[in-house]
């Protein structure tokens, strides 16, 4: 059996590994010319940890994880207004929480492909697909650039929130995309002074309707994650100029980051993807293409690994196209409840992550400061885990 996987993100790479280990042939086609260097930090725990341990991916992820000591909110004057002991939270969440940069997760998944028998998984970057069609019981893909047409028993759409596979076989993007009224940007810069200041800490601006997250990486680099409210129908100007305008006055450290902002950083709507059925005939969706939970849920990477593992479990025993419908039904049966929980968490996060008024900032500070009281840290950690780790 052969699968074509469109998208070399976390979901696509892990799915390719699982299929290759099960004896399938897998061809991964990625539009980007190389692995993407930019991305944001994610907490990886709960279902993601369970799935990664079961399939043997966890050691690769642990190798690139960051040791975060604290999460802090800082006002525009540079004063810490509230903080959370991250190590204590990790312990209360079960002790197995990884802080992972999205590009590092992809590099770990790439490294894990070495376990697959040579020749079973092919990976091509810089592929601009011209056409995708059903071909009897199979699918055909035209990679473009003079490359030959590829035929497979299954096409897996792992190409993200703006999935071309979904658009080609399931319908236009607007039928499935549910914007949450905000946008998120992310980029990485080389800035030794800020790196020293924010090493081993998540620092977020304590501001209304916008939040800038900063964390120090390896090699004197600093990563940023900026979230702000934005009307989905509003006309957008240049990204760097828009970010500088919206985040003006958020603090000197944020100003310095935006001085170094690249001309065209990652910037996209915060949205969920809601697709009634994730498969039809010989096409299936996975990861954000099937069910983006939103960046604010912090579970995109975990759900990508869960989905790839579940798809691998369902497809591993398949030896003929006639067995595909039942296997894909099983994949959805396993993943639907997990996705529903993560998407509900994402909607709650969208309502609380960006307070609309100063009263919301004060309430958040009160909640975080209460974690210093005996017993309250456990109550709050349990609530977070209950929401995200089901």
Image (cartoon, rainbow, N blue to C red):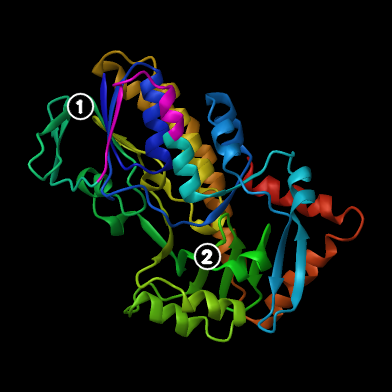
Please determine whether, in this image, residue 250 is positioned above or below residue 174: below
Q: Residue 368, percent across and down?
A: 77, 65
Q: Is residue 281 visible?
A: yes
Please determine whether, in this image, residue 84 is positioned above or below residue 9: below
Crowd around label 1: few <14 · some 14–19 · many ≥20 (10 Å): many
Mark positioned earlier in the residue sequence (2 or 1): 1
Q: Residue 278, percent across and down?
A: 35, 39
Q: Which residues are magenta?
A: 111-125
Tag shown at residue 225: 2
Image quadrant for the C terminus? top right
Judged left or right of residue 372, residue 83 is: left
Image quadrant for the N terminus? top left
Judged left or right of residue 262, residue 5 is: left
Observer-nearest of 272 and 6: 6
Q: Nearer the viewer, mark 2 or mark 1?
A: 2
Q: Which residue is mark 1?
A: 152
User: In what element is the residue under mark 2?
Assistant: strand
Please determine whether, in this image, residue 286 is positioned above or below residue 240: above
Residue at 36% from the left image edge and 22% from the top image edge: 20
Q: Residue 280, percent across and down?
A: 27, 34
Is residue 119 inside the magenta stretch?
A: yes
Please determine whether, in this image, residue 50 is positioned above or below residue 217: above
Is residue 108 inside the magenta stretch?
A: no
Q: CA distance from mark 2 to mark 1?
A: 38 Å
Tag shown at residue 169: none
Q: Residue 193, percent across and down?
A: 62, 70
């Amino acid at each position: 059996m052969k699968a074509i996987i469109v998208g070399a993100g976390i979901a696509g790479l892990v799915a390719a590994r699982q299929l290759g280990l099960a004896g399938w042939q897998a061809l991964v086609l990625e539009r980007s010319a190389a692995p993407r260097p930019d991305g944001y930090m994610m907490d990886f725990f709960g279902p993601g940890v369970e799935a990664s341990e079961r399939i043997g991916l966890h050691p690769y992820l642990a190798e690139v994880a960051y040791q975060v000591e604290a999460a802090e909110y800082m006002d525009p004057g540079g004063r810490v207004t509230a903080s959370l002991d991250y190590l204590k939270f990790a312990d209360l969440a079960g002790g197995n929480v990884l802080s992972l940069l999205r590009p590092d997760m992809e590099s770990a998944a790439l490294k894990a492909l070495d376990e697959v028998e040579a020749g079973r998984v092919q990976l091509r970057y810089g592929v601009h697909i011209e056409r995708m069609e059903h071909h009897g019981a199979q699918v055909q893909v035209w990679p473009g650039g003079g490359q030959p047409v590829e035929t497979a028993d299954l096409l897996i759409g792992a190409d993200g929130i703006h999935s071309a596979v979904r658009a080609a076989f399931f319908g236009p993007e607007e039928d499935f995309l549910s914007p949450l009224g905000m946008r998120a940007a992310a980029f990485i810069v080389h800035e030794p002074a800020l790196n020293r200041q924010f090493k081993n800490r998540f620092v977020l601006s304590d501001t209304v309707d916008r939040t800038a997250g900063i964390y120090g990486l390896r090699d004197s680099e600093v990563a940023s994650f900026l979230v702000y409210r934005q009307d989905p129908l509003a006309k957008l100007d240049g990204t760097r100029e828009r970010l500088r305008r919206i985040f003006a006055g958020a603090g000197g450290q944020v100003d310095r980051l935006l001085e170094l902002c690249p001309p065209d950083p990652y910037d996209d709507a915060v949205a969920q993807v809601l697709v009634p059925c994730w498969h039809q005939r010989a096409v299936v969706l996975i990861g954000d293409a099937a069910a983006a939970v939103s960046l604010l849920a912090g579970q995109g990477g975990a759900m990508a690994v869960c989905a790839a593992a579940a798809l691998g479990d369902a497809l591993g025993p398949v030896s003929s196209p006639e067995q595909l419908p039942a296997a894909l039904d099983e994949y959805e049966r396993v993943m639907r409840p997990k996705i529903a929980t993560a998407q509900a968490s994402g909607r709650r996060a969208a309502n609380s992550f960006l307070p609309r008024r100063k009263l919301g900032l004060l309430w958040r500070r009160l909640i975080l400061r209460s974690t210093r009281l005996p017993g309250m840290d456990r109550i709050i950690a349990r609530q977070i885990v209950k929401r995200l780790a089901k």
